[in-house]
Amino acid sequence: MVEDLHVAGMLQNRRLARHVADASFAEFRRQVQYKSAWHGGRVITADRWFPSSKTCSGCGAVKAKLLLSERTYQCDGCGLVLDQEVNAARNLAAYGRRQIAGSGPEIPNGRGADRKTGPSRQAGVKRQPGTRKRGQTGTVLAQAGTAT
C-alpha cells in the first residue's frame, strides 16, 4: 500500500525540500512495485486526495484542517486521541482492505502454498537431463539409515 503524494508541491516548501528530495519517493515506489510483482503480490495506491491523516480511524469524521505541527490526532466526534501517523496508517490499511474486497476473492498467499517439506514427506531432487528412469516422479523417499 502506497500513497500517491504530490512530491513536486512538497519540493516547493523550503523547509521540506531537501528532506523530501533525499527520501527518493519515486525510487522507493518503483522498488516496491518491482518486488511485489516478483513475489506475486500487488501494490495498492491511495489517491493523492485521500484524506488519510485528516480522517478519524475510529468514527470516520474528517477534519477540515490539520497542521503538520500537530503530531497527535484528536477527533472532535468520538474523542479518539492517537498519534497522527498511526491514525493515517490505520486509514490506509482500511482503504487497502476495501480495494481488495471490491476486486474479487483474494488468495491469502499471493505465490500459492509456500510450505516447508516435512521430515516424513518426499523431497524434490534435481537430476541431470536424461537420467530419469521409467516410473520415477522426481522425488525420493528418505534413505534408510540417514538422519531425517
Image: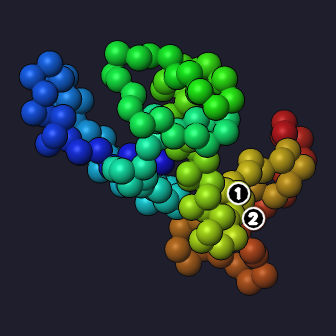
Residue 36 spot, x, y in % from top left: 45, 54
Q: CA distance from mark 2 to mark 1?
A: 27 Å
Residue 85 visible: yes
Q: Which residue is mark 1?
A: 108
Q: Which of the labelled discs sits on residue 139, or is there none?
A: 2
Q: Is residue 76 above or below residue 57?
A: above
Residue 86: quarter of image: top right
Quarter of the image for residue 78 reads top right
Disc 2 versus disc 1: nearer the observer? 1
**Residue 56 coordinates in the image, percent (x, y):** 58, 35
Label 2: element kind:
strand
The quarter of the picture where the C terminus appears is top right
Q: Which residue is located at x 78 percent, y 61 percent?
A: 140
Amino acid under disc 2: Thr
Q: How many circles with numbers are drawn on the protein?
A: 2
Picture layout, residue 119 above or below residue 103: above
- Judging depth in this view, the residue of 38 and 82 nearest the camera is 82
